[in-house]
Image (cartoon, coloured by chain):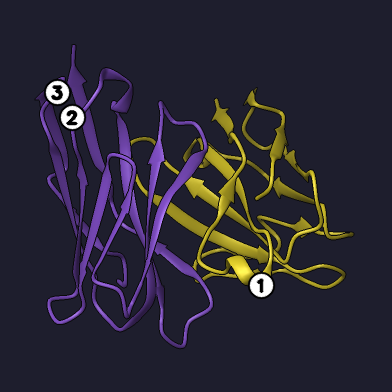
Amino acid sequence: SAVISQKPSRDICQRGTSLTIQCQVDSQVTMMFWYRQQPGQSLTLIATANQGSEATYESGFVIDKFPISRPNLTFSTLTVSNMSPEDSSIYLCSVVASEAEVGTQYFGPGTRLLVL
Amino acid sequence: SQQGEEDPQALSIQEGENATMNCSYKTSINNLQWYRQNSGRGLVHLILIRSNEREKHSGRLRVTLDTSKKSSSLLITASRAADTASYFCATDYTGGFKTIFGAGTRLFVKA
């Protein structure tokens, strides 16, 4: 298993600014992911955070808008750049703890973002 | 879209009743998972069923998988008010490297 924390838990931001969300895991993990959940909707995968290399982005998401870092096996950041009200969502970090647990994701508590 | 579909979208029951939620998906899978989410917080993994399994139990949870119909169901028996949450199915597709989440079922259990 894995215990995940995210910072900040929530924020209210002005359009045009950027916010960096941190995801910290209590142990080294195999895979880390970033999801977006718009109000009342399901989860949409933004990207897979790759340790020491560029993230793998899903269709509709680009590095300029959502730069991601993963410097080691326990930490990742997601930046939401040049924000607009449409970026208001919950942003969730998740991990697959090990190869043996492929198929089971552990989620952080999420970051609620409101863009005015 | 590969996203699975869940029904019902919303379900309201009395405490003590059973709740059944269904999930359908579109292509071959390696496994299917169910998650719970309380009030827009992080998701909690409930149970995973592999493509070669037909039924799985965990406490008051029972999950079935019918790969011929590409569907799964989650049964919560003897529901409690604390079971009030959104429930999502998620699938790992064969040959894919990501998990696809369904639209979710909002369950409300009245005390």
**Disc 1 designates what residue?**
A99
Residue at 78%, 71% in the rendered image: A54
Mark 1–mark 3 distance (CA, rounded to whole Å): 38 Å
| Residues under numbered marks 1 and 3 in contact, where contact means CB atoms less than 8 Å apart | no
> As shown in the figure, which amino acid type bears the numbered disc 3?
Gly
Q: Is mark 3 on a helix, strand or loop?
A: loop
**Disc 2 designates what residue?**
B78
Which one of the lettered chains is coloured purple? B
Residue at 66%, 56% in the rendered image: A65
**Where's the C terminus of chain A, which quadrant?**
top right
Q: What element carries label 2?
A: loop
| Left or right, B66 with reference to B47 | left
Q: Residue furthest bottom?
A: B95
Which one of the lettered chains is coloured yellow? A
| Residues under numbered marks 3 and 2 in contact, where contact means CB atoms less than 8 Å apart | yes
**Disc 3 designates what residue?**
B16
In the rendered structure, the residue with mark 2 lies on which chain? B
Q: In this view, does A21 lie above or below A61?
A: above
In the rendered structure, the residue with mark 1 lies on which chain? A
